Image (tube, grey):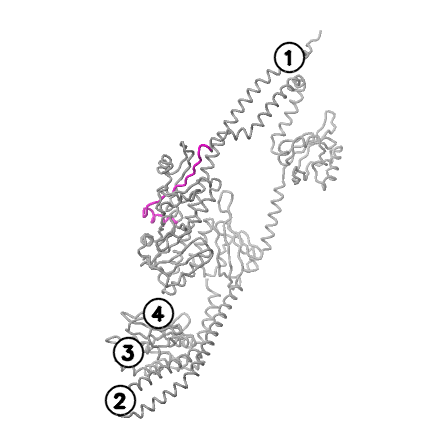
């Protein structure tokens, strides 16, 4: 009798019992799994919705804060730049021109601001820049307005130095009406102080609110159909339903709390959160615009702003109705119904098959257990594993291999490795390696091989190969464990390409560490600067400094880089040989995955020749414009002189004859009319003379002359008017006045005109006084003679001072407006200058600064500029 009984033969009843014992538990398990699956699906979907809402609300809040912070940085940059340049204390014309130039360039570069204005401490607009669809307009002086009574001026000026004023977010109003189409704006203001800390005005920026709203919508694009921006009173600033927006500006009471009173109570009394009501899921957070603005300021300025203004708040709210949240079950059935039906059928069929094959499974269990332990090891490593037999057919592959190649297991097992998976160019080489299995001593243990993937893109894998042997020691196959190095090789090629691009770049490239010490320079840097890489590695780029860039500019550069921005500008640097050159630079930080600065990159272009050509073109344009103007003036003056002088001479001669032959019988009135006519003819001759003098300037006839003698002769030419008007004239000549190399006739014309103007300015004074003082002045460009002509007359207002040397500009009823223009022309010919200032306590002072030797002065200036270019740091 056998020691063990043979297994009982399976019967239909036994198979049925086995089927039922397997089928019912599996069905129950399938039902439980389905319920758990649905619960997990519902929980996941709900959590995903909550997370998505919270994430998008936070992104929108962060975007608003960053937008406001960027505007504040721009505002403080403009205010600090004006202060650092000393513009609040500059002459009005210089201040307005330079601020307008700075604002125009800034507005064009940024393209974000509707208006940029500079107002003085009285509320008067000094400069206003309008930006509209890419067009930058400097508003003419006559259109500038006084904003002293506007709330935003008073509140901005009330801030401490360095402080920030932020207006409410509303619609732009022009001439008392809301501008259409609607233009949302936020006004940002900051005081401007002089070097003593006294407030001299404010910089005011009108930020286009539509950009903030667009950025807000883009930041939360995935929930744009139900995210809203509210002000502190519940009015919509942005809503998917645009008709609800700006109720507080349109005298409408459409507010969030009207439809959602319970939700608004929670939102209004909390900073942020997420909750559900009968109306749905609400996610909200609070934005404090002023706090966002203050956060962008340096720590020393933040304390100035704290507590100065109330902190208005905005609310970002997303709302999903319950109907949208509760729609998960139909979605679950749609996504998984076919799966569970298939699983039920599969369970039914599979259970039958399983019941039939249970016996066979038990017999093979031991062998499978061994194979599973072996393959389990290969399955759990993060490397590709493939086993081949001696014919090159695949007997095993792990999941990692399938993941990186995209093949399914059934597409791999049993297939010929060479034909199916090796690229054509490598098939011959791999065939030879397969044949080498018969000689284990020569079989390669390491191999890099390109493997075909399902999508046709080969992957480069490095294989470590191990031969498998049977119990008799015969080779039965090979197992390869491989690592995908495709991306590593691609990265190496990209790095090489990038390195070659930088090395061959036509621009200088400099990379430093976070402290500014040079780590790398390309050959172009050596070509431009003259320094080799070995000379500059480990050193600071300040070795190129010429001293012309201020500390404030460098401070702005570093602040921009460390804040994550890109700084662009120009440097006037020095080469190794001491020669100065211009560079246009773009500098930014290189950050790691955590956002920490690891290096600083500078890309620079030599623009020295470009700068020189720009100056040359500008000079030629000025000369050409002047030549054209003078040519036109000359033609006009010649025509007038030709057509009027001869008739005037005839009339003048006739009147002079009548005057000499005065008949006592003729009435006194007739003689008076004759005298008046002669005076008018002389006046017209003076006009013609001035026009010819201005339009056709004579060449200088210089000689060495004493300045005091020239002034005395000029005074003598005006003595008749002085005595007639009883004007007190005082002259003072400092001792040691040098002689000048100049045209005496021209200078007499200059001083005669200026003295006559001073006499004319005092005609309405009870005690008219004019003083003339000549002295030596030591300037940066050599020794000069300064002549001051001052009067106690009515004075000249600031606007007239700006235009008084323009041709044909005059404030008198009589006069050509060419006298001072001729004076300016003559002084320009002498390379001299003229300045206007107010006299104390009343009147005007004209200062003429004459170089002793204009030719030498020009040479000295050129030498000085060359010296500065060579030695200035």
How far across and down, in percent of the image, does residue 798 sit? 34, 67
Compare marks 4 and 1 and give the one earlier in the sequence: 1
Q: Which mark is residue 675?
A: none
In the image, 528 versus 30, the foreground residue is 30
Q: Which mark is residue 667?
A: 2
How far across and down, in percent of the image, does residue 296 sit? 40, 48
> What span is colored magenta in the figure?
297-323
Q: Which mark is residue 730?
A: 3
Label 3 secondary element: strand
Cβ–Cβ under 8 Å for marks 3 and 1: no
Compare marks 4 and 2 and give the one earlier in the sequence: 2
How far apart are labels 1 and 2 at the CA level? 160 Å
Q: Is residue 553 above or below residue 228?
A: below
How far apart are labels 3 and 4 at the CA level? 26 Å
* Residue at (27, 82) in percent of width and height: 724
Q: Is residue 669 above or below residue 95?
A: below
Residue matched to label 1: 14
How far across and down, in percent of the image, does residue 822 sit? 40, 77
In the rendered image, the quadrant that contains the N terminus is: top right
Residue matched to label 4: 800
The 10 Å Cα crowd at callout 1, few under 14, some 14 to 19, many 20 or more, is few
Compare marks 3 and 1 and give the one earlier in the sequence: 1
In the image, 330 versus 589, the foreground residue is 330
Residue placed furthest toward the top: 1
Q: Is residue 846 left or right of residue 17?
A: left
How far apart are labels 4 and 1 at the CA level? 119 Å
Label 1 secondary element: helix
* Residue at (64, 12) in percent of width and height: 14
Label 2 secondary element: loop
How far across and down, in percent of the image, does residue 808 sit? 39, 74
């Amino acid at each position: 009798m056998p020691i063990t009984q043979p297994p009982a033969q399976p019967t239909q009843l036994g198979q049925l019992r086995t089927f039922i014992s397997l089928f019912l538990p599996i069905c129950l398990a399938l039902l439980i799994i389905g319920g758990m699956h649905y619960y997990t699906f519902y929980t996941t979907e709900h959590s995903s919705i909550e997370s998505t809402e919270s994430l998008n609300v936070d992104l929108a809040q962060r975007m608003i804060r960053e937008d406001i912070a960027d505007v504040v940085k721009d505002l403080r940059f403009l205010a600090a730049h004006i202060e650092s340049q000393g513009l609040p204390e500059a002459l009005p014309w210089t201040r307005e021109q330079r601020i307008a130039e700075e604002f125009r360039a800034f507005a064009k570069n940024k393209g974000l601001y509707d208006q940029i204005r500079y107002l003085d401490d009285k509320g008067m607009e000094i400069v206003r820049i309008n930006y509209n669809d890419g067009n930058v307009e400097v508003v003419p002086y006559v259109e500038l307005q006084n904003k002293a009574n506007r709330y935003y001026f008073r509140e901005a000026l009330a801030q401490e130095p360095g402080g920030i004023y932020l207006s409410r977010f509303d619609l732009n109003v022009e001439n008392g009406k809301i501008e259409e189409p609607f233009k949302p704006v936020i006004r940002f203001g900051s005081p401007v102080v002089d070097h003593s800390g006294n407030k001299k005005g404010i910089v005011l920026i009108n930020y286009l609110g539509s950009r903030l709203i667009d950025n807000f919508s883009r930041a939360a694009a995935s929930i744009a159909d139900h995210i809203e921006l509210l002000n502190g009173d519940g009015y919509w600033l942005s809503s998917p339903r645009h008709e609800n927006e700006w109720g507080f500006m349109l005298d409408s009471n459409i507010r969030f709390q009207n439809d959602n009173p319970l939700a608004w109570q929670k939102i209004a009394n909390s900073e942020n959160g997420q909750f559900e009501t009968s109306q749905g899921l609400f996610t909200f957070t609070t934005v404090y615009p002023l706090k966002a603005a203050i956060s962008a300021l340096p720590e020393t300025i933040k304390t100035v702003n704290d507590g100065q203004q109330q902190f208005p708040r905005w609310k970002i709210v997303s709302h999903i109705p319950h109907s949208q949240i509760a729609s998960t079950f139909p979605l679950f059935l749609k996504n998984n119904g076919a799966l569970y039906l298939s699983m039920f059928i599969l369970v039914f069929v599979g259970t039958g098959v399983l019941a039939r094959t249970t016996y066979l499974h038990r017999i093979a269990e031991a062998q499978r257990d061994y194979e599973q332990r072996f393959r389990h090891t290969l399955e759990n490593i993060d490397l590709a594993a493939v086993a081949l037999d001696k014919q090159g057919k695949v007997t095993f592959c792990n999941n990692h291999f399938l993941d990186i190649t995209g093949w399914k297991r059934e597409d791999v097992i049993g297939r010929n490795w060479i034909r199916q998976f090796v690229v054509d160019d490598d098939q011959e080489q791999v065939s030879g390696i397969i044949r080498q299995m018969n000689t284990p001593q020569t079989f390669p243990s390491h191999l890099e091989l390109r493997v075909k993937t399902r999508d046709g893109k080969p992957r480069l894998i490095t294989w470590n190969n191990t031969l498998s042997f049977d119990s008799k020691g015969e080779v039965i196959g090979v197992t390869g464990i491989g690592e995908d190095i495709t991306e590593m090789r691609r990265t190496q090629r990209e790095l090489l390409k990038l390195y070659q691009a930088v090395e061959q770049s036509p621009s200088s490239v400099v990379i430093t560490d976070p402290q500014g010490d040079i780590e790398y320079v390309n050959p172009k840097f050596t070509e431009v600067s003259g320094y080799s890489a070995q000379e500059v590695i480990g050193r600071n780029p300040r070795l190129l400094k010429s001293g012309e860039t201020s500390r404030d500019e460098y401070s702005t550069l570093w602040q921009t880089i460390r804040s994550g921005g890109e700084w662009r500008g120009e440097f006037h640097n020095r080469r190794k040989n001491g020669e100065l050159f211009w560079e246009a630079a773009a500098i930014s930080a290189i950050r790691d995955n955590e956002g920490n600065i690891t290096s600083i990159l500078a890309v620079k272009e030599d623009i020295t020749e470009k700068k020189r050509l720009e100056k040359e073109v500008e000079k030629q344009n000025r000369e050409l414009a002047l030549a054209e103007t003078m040519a036109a003036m000359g033609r006009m003056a010649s025509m007038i002189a030709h057509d009027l002088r001869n008739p005037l001479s005839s009339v003048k001669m006739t009147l002079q004859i009548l005057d000499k032959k005065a008949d006592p019988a003729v009435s006194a009135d007739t003689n008076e009319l004759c005298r008046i006519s002669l005076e008018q003819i002389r006046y017209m001759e003076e006009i013609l003379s001035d026009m010819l003098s201005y339009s056709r300037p004579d060449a200088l006839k210089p000689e060495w002359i004493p300045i005091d003698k020239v002034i005395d002769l000029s005074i003598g030419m005006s003595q008749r008017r002085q005595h007639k008007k009883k004007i007190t004239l005082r002259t003072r000549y400092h001792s040691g006045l040098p002689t000048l190399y100049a045209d005496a006739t021209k200078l007499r014309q200059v001083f005669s005109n200026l003295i006559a103007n001073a006499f004319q300015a005092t005609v309405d004074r009870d005690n008219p006084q004019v003083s003339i003082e000549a002295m030596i002045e030591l300037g940066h460009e050599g020794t000069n003679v300064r002549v001051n002509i001052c009067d106690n007359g009515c004075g000249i207002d600031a606007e007239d001072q700006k235009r008084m040397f323009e041709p044909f500009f005059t404030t008198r009823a009589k006069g050509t407006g060419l006298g001072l223009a001729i004076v300016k022309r003559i002084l320009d010919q002498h390379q001299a200058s003229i300045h206007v200032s107010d006299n104390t306590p009343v009147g005007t002072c004209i200062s003429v600064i004459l170089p002793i030797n204009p030719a030498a002065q020009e040479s000295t200036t050129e030498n000085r500029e060359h010296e500065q270019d060579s030695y200035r740091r």
